[in-house]
Amino acid sequence: MSLDTAPDLAPAPTIPLTHARLPRWAPALVAVVTIAAAGLLPLLLGWGFVAWVLVSVVLFIAGLTIWSAVVETRRSAIDRMVTSLVWTAFGIALVPLVSLLWTVISKGAPHVNGTFLTFSAFRTSLDQPIGIYHAIIGTLVITICAAVISVPTGIFAAIYLVEYGKGNKLARGITFLVDVMTGIPSIVAGLFAFSMFTAFFGAGYRAGIGGAVALSLLMIPIVVRSTEEMLRLVPNDLREAAYALGTPKWRTITKVVLRTSLGGIITGVTLATARIIGETAPLLLIAGLTTRTNTNPFDGFMTTVPVFIYSQFAKGTKADFDLAWGAALVLVVIVLLLNIAARVIGKIFAPKTGR
Amino acid sequence: MAKSIDVSDLNIYYGDFMAVEGVNMTIKAKSVTAFIGPSGCGKSTFLRSLNRMHEVIPGARVEGKVMVDGQSLYGANVDPVAVRRQIGMVFQRPNPFPTMSIYENVLAGNRLNAKKMKKNVADEIVERSLKGANLWNEVKDRLGRPGLGLSGGQQQRLCIARAIAVEPEVLLMDEPCSALDPISTSAVEDLIHELKSEYTIVIVTHNMQQAARVSDETGFFNLKAAGQPGHLVEFNSTQKMFANPDNPDTEAYISGRFG
């Protein structure tokens, strides 16, 4: 095309930048109408609450999409439909969480009191008060022992994988085994600990430390994975900066790499602890069941809160159930506190920009 | 305390790939030496081989000789950590330690090596290094604030302060101004002029005006073809390089006819 010929100068039609929009209150109006319409079902046909909610949601999505398709553009209609679907999915995801918390709090809260928290389940006559003190102590001792075994092992393994292994055969093998370990059922970990302690200390050996070993089998892979992720996030620039100052590798790792990723590592460790604190099956096998308070992990049976809950349900009277619900609430609160602690610690140690 | 560097027949490899071939040069003490050349020609690789930072990358290795004041850097018993304590480095992107304050960042070279020092000695090192890096007046009231809170140009000068706080004999700079604005660049260039009296400085730059402004001698690196190793085309005084280079390729590059 030559540039000599004058282009056709017919004015181009203006492309509109606006189109018809539904009013801001449209979704609210559709919601009210559909909920009311679906409300006829329970009234006329005797359907239940769940059906009412389901029909309302389906009607709402269909109604809003069709209205939008008629008034607005096709793209707006799809946008409104997908937005509604995403909100619905979010609501569905919340249902079990809220319902679980509500059940545990409503059934457990009335039974949690000073006696409940400070008395063990050991009694010599039926009129003596009992509580879950022994189970709380058991949970704390076993979890702390498991953490003492798992945290150094896991962190050092992750340091090897990221800083020294760098994709060699051994590192790839360890990564594969860690992935496999993430998937082993907890009862298998319990059986492993059980048979190991039987082999070393003879048949019938039961102690809290066995439970801690079983739990550490479950905890180590989680600690390795989360620490590995955190160490990989540390920019290589920082390692090179430290090397260029004449810092040996091990000091670079301890003072720069670990220090920079400390917040994330602590968060990962805390979440791993929260994950294993609720384990029941392996502890039932190796730590045993007792009603007395035992603070020595190396000698004698030791009961944790989940095992206590399980044994209460096996007994089956109303009073036993009440104790179980109270213990469940205490367990949820412990996990919640651990999660909050993880967030706070993560914040404290996170690198600051100071702006 | 500045030292000269003699390089002879240096080949640098990444695994089987030869990145830089047959470099011979002598870098004079207490002078600024600049390396220029197109991207990927091995300037940075060569610079990193001068303080054994090259081998931090897995599979990287070096053949040939690098002598610093008569000592070979690649001898059998040479400790790379000891080499890096004498030959400091400033990187392309400012990389202050994010968990440390400005004060701690300057002292990082000493602290990371667990050197015990009295408070007044430490204060003195921090003040001298920050003054040396032209940063003291801007940060003297907020030494306890995180190093990441500074602007990009200030962060780069903080990194230079950190590098000179350990009193190296040679300072390597890998495109230290490529992430900076003209004002910060000018501050860093002034700094290079001042540091020249005490240190041997080697700088890689993509900016030929910068090479002409700051350096005493210039090396031009180039590739024969894509996939071929880079090599040193010409090494001469900066004045000669920019006025009347010996090699026609150098002249073509400097005058902007290629690259």
Image (cartoon, rainbow, N blue to C red):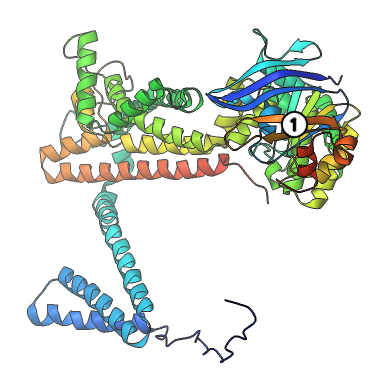
Q: Quadrant of residue B228?
A: top right
Residue B67 figure quarter: top right
Image: A201 above or below A28 = above
**Mark 1 belongs to which amino acid?**
Val
For the image, the number of numbered tags is 1
- Where does the image place residue A277, in percent across and percent down from the top left? 32, 35
Does residue B189 show up? yes
For the N terminus of chain A, which image quadrant? bottom right
Would you say A115 lies left or right of A340 here? left
A238 or A338, which is in the foreground?
A238
Residue at screen point 24% across, 79% down: A35
For the residue pair B163 and A336, the one nearer the viewer reads as: B163
| Element type at mark 1 | strand
Instruction: Identify residue for label 1.
Output: B233
Taking the view exactly as shown, the residue that stands out farthest to the bottom is A10
Q: Can residue A145 be seen in the rendering of this structure?
A: no
Q: Residue at x 69, y 41 (%)?
A: B38
Q: Is residue A91 above or below residue A2?
A: above
Residue A233 is left or right of residue B108, and the answer is: left
Res B216 quadrant in image: top right
Could you say where residue A84 lies in the image, as x and y percent from the top left? 32, 71
Answer above or below: position of A343 versus A19.
above
Whole-percent x, y for residue B178 in the image: 72, 45
In the foreground, A326 or A35: A35
- Taking the spot 67% from the left edge, 48% from the top edge, the residue there is A354
> Disc 1: which chain?
B
> Measured from the top left, where is residue A274 in percent x and y?
36, 38
Query: Which residue appears farthest toward the left when viewing the image?
Result: A45
Q: Residues within 10 Å of mark 1 (few under 14, many from 20)?
A: some
Left or right: A58 as drawn, with respect to B174 = left
Residue A261 is left or right of residue A202, and the answer is: right
